[in-house]
Image: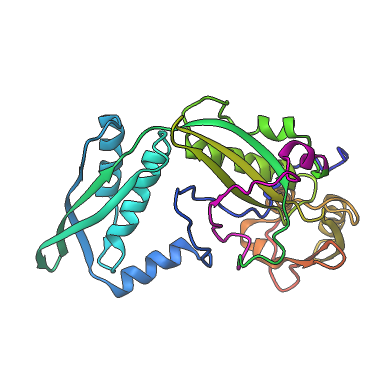
Amino acid sequence: MRDGPAFFVGAGIACLLLLPAPVSAQRSHDPCSAEKEREDSYPPIVLHDLKFDGKLAIPESDLQEFISDVMQRKLYADPEWFDRIAEEARGLWQSRGYFKVLMDDPEPQIFSIDSAGHHAFLTIRVNEGPRYRLKDIHFRKGDFAESNLETADARPALRKKRSSPDQNPVSANLRLAFPDEELRRLVPLQDGDILRVDQIREGLDALKKLYGAYGYINLVVIPNTEVNDEKRTVSITMELDEGKPFRIGRVESQNHDPALDRAFQQAFPSGTLFSNDAWEAGIKTLLPTFLAQQASLRKDEANGTVDITIDTRTCALPDR
């Protein structure tokens, strides 16, 4: 299977927010448009102070860097502005091993309102809990075709690992496209290291790159955890719904320049494995930025193909 394209790919993988409590799947949205909607609908928040209360062991420098970043942002007084900050702070602690950290009832205090906006203080009580280490990571095949995930970018729930004698992660891995050892090398954490959620995410990015390079553009990964509170360790089993590898189907290129048509046909030969990164790199190489929107993709799930259409006939190409 190593006859794939030279470009790497970003496969469609479910993004993961590793929280001790389950997180409901939610429809993905454009964060830029959400920010614009808040700007149009709510007055600004002028945050004068952000304070974390509790017995804290996290390095002060990390905390001050986080506070400084939040204080420099544009904030708006929608009902969830302080909860978003608390959730982001939870990620800060989880990326330093505090896997079960709790952010207890953020307390915003609006002390003044004027033409500049709502002037506020924000206090967040933190229960760090102990630091956890990674015990091990395994990979096994999963099938989430009937799951309630609404999109490939929905956030799956972090689930407790199921225990069953016929679900050995090593033997199950024989059904995966890549060996367990190769997948494990993609996660920068070693067994016994402090559990850092940000490095788990790095591993997930590497997973989608690897799978996407061989056409697995529907890849979904769901993490199951097994927590040992006595030993303060966490075992992670990644369930992978690989889907099937997609290949390039029809390539329709209609442009002013016949040489450009030939270049597209050569860059995206029908029948070869499709990759998102190869597609994006090819478009950037062959088309000016203002023409990139004239290229479109259509995925045929039944046949496992991606059809490509590029039509720039209605656009004026720059002089060569």
Of 227 and 198, which appears nearest the observer?
227
Viewer can see residue 8: no
Q: Is residue 201 left or right of residue 305?
A: left
The x, y position of residue 205, in whole percent, is 61, 43
Nearer-the-camera pick, 227 or 82:
227
Side of 107 where 22 appears, left or right: right
Q: Is residue 114 left or right of residue 172?
A: left
Tell which residue pokes out farthest to the front in this image. Answer: 165
Residue at the (69%, 51%) spot, across then down = 11
In which quadrant of the rendered view does residue 294 lie?
bottom right
Q: Nearer the viewer, residue 147 or 218?
A: 147
* 109 is higher (above) or lower (below) than 207: below
Residue 206 position in % (x across, y down): 64, 39
The outermost residue toward the right is: 271
What x and y, as percent, mark residue 217? 73, 54
Q: Position of residue 145 (x, y in %)?
A: 72, 64
Q: Residue at x 63, y 49 (%)?
A: 162
> Which residues make up the magenta segment?
150-174
Whether residue 51 appears in magenta in the rendering, the answer is no
Q: Quadrant of the N terminus?
A: top right
Query: Does residue 212 appear in the picture of this structure?
Result: yes
Q: Nearer the viewer, residue 247 or 18?
A: 18
